[in-house]
Image (cartoon, helix red, strand yellow):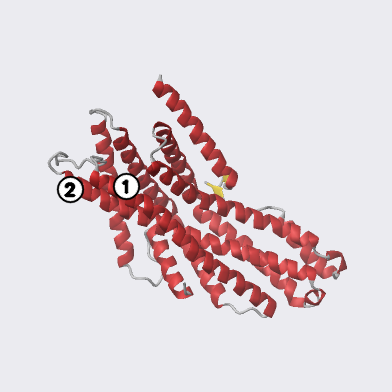
């Protein structure tokens, strides 16, 4: 994927997430997603209306499952969009940061080479993760649409229309919104994933530069090399705080909605352990939440590694001036910066484990009371 195509895709993803166009883009794209938001809100009302009708009939567990999951999926999408709308300017600043680094030319050849290599890796992994996420979400969407077409799973109820005489309309609308929800989820989530990948590889480039500085005596004699590292370290702190600020509420919405969705899916897996679609849905949700937790863990790990790499340099052989610079960087690195949901709860792989344990526990409790 060429960088120009990647930036176009990133801008589209940002607009789909924040519902506001990026500077320089046409306004019709923003209007399109605002209209889509209104349509999705109406669709959520249709699913809630369907739930009220289900309660008056003999309970069909599969219909309940698809209705609840569709409602949770649409609600999660809208809440995550609303959560990041106030931080559109911060997201645009992160986009500008990526663009600036692509055209930036460093004074030192080693620094320029490391930066280019790490950003090339970021572009490569961005393309790979986009393909993986798109595939993992579209497969359940295709299976669900197949189920909706061939079975009597009416997950919406349009007021004023009889479900018995307008089955085709209800099914067609459900299938259309299933694909809309799936593709919209992928594109909007990739806005955060792309930026997160670039931030991680920027941290990796700083750690590489610190290792090069510690291992090469010739580099240590270059006066601007260490100054460039501390400038990048200061830039890292600014970018991490900006990224954390822009995703703090969206990550909170993701954790809450994922916990509820995990609970529903795990409960129905206990009821229907051989139902393959449920396991595919669970895997897709794990990947979606896993990306967020992985970014939190990677950012925290790379940030923590900076202090360790600085300590392992031969700082005692450096001049007093360089020793003070390294001491300043180590002092700034003592406070490890990571992602926090709502600005309070640390996001990492342990968060994923805790959410799964919580969902399994509550699903088991509900299952026990249901059997009784």
Where in the figure is residue 115, as x and y percent of width and height?
62, 72
Task: Pick whichever of labels 2 and 1 is earlier in the sequence.
Answer: 1
Residue at the image point whose x is 39% and y is 42% from the top: 276
How crowded pointer 1 is (Cα within 10 Å; few <14, some 14-19, many 20+) is rated as some
Q: List x then y, in percent, for residue 59.
A: 28, 29
Give x and y (percent) for residue 252.
Answer: 49, 46
Specify the quadrant of the image occupied by residue 26: bottom left
Q: Please give the label number shown on residue 169.
A: 2
Residue furthest out toward the right? 317
Question: As drawn, is 105 to the left or to the right of 178?
Answer: right
> Given this view, does label 2 or label 1 mark the residue nearer the observer?
1
- Neighbourhood count class around disc 2 (C-alpha, 10 Å): few under 14, some 14–19, many 20 upward: few
Closest to the observer, 372 or 248: 372
In which image quadrant can residue 209 be found? bottom right
Q: Nearer the viewer, residue 100 or 65?
A: 65
User: In the current view of this chain or complex, which residue is farthest to the front?
Assistant: 274
Q: Which residue is mark 1?
A: 144
**Residue under the point 80% across and 69% down:** 322
Depth check: give the residue in front, 84 or 278.
Answer: 278
Residue at 47 percent of width and 75 percent of height? 2
Can residue 39 be seen here?
Answer: no
Task: Report how far apart the C-alphas of labels 2 and 1 lie in the structure.
Answer: 17 Å
Is residue 103 depicted above or below 81 in this figure?
A: below
Q: Kindly state the secondary structure of the residue where label 1 is placed.
A: helix
Q: Position of 110 compared to 46: left or right?
A: right
Image quadrant where one finds the C terminus: top left
Residue occupying the point 46% across, 47% down: 283
């Amino acid at each position: 994927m060429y960088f120009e195509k990647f930036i176009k895709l990133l801008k589209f993803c940002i607009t789909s997430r924040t519902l506001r166009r990026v500077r320089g883009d046409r306004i019709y794209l923003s209007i399109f997603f605002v209209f889509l938001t209104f349509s999705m809100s109406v669709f959520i009302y249709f699913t809630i209306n369907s739930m009220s009708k289900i309660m008056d009939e003999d309970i069909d567990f599969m219909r309940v499952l698809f209705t609840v999951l569709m409602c949770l999926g649409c609600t999660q999408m809208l809440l995550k969009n609303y959560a990041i709308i106030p931080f559109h300017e911060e997201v645009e600043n992160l986009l500008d940061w990526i663009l600036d680094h692509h055209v930036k030319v460093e004074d030192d050849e080693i620094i320029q080479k490391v930066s280019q290599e790490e950003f090339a890796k970021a572009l490569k992994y961005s393309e790979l993760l986009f393909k993986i996420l798109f595939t993992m979400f579209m497969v359940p969407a295709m299976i669900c649409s197949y189920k909706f077409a061939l079975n009597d799973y009416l997950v919406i109820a349009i007021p004023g229309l009889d479900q018995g005489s307008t089955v085709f309309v209800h099914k067609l609308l459900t299938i259309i919104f299933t694909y809309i929800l799936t593709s919209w989820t992928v594109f909007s989530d990739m806005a955060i994933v792309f930026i997160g990948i670039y931030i991680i590889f920027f941290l990796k480039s700083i750690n590489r530069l610190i290792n090069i500085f510690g291992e090469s005596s010739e580099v240590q004699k270059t006066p601007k090399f260490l100054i460039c590292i501390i400038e990048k370290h200061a830039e890292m702190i600014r970018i991490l705080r900006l990224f954390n600020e822009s995703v703090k509420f969206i990550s909170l919405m993701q954790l809450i909605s994922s916990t509820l969705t995990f609970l529903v899916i795990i409960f129905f897996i206990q009821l229907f352990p051989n139902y393959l679609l449920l396991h595919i849905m669970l895997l897709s949700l794990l990947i979606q939440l896993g990306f967020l937790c992985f970014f939190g863990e990677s950012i925290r790990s790379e940030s923590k590694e900076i202090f360790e790499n600085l300590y392992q340099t031969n700082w005692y052989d450096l001049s007093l001036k360089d020793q003070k610079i390294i001491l300043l960087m180590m002092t700034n690195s003592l406070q490890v910066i990571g992602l926090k949901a709502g600005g309070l709860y640390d996001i990492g792989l342990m968060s994923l484990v805790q959410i799964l344990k919580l969902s399994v526990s509550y699903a088991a409790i509900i299952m026990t009371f249901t059997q009784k």
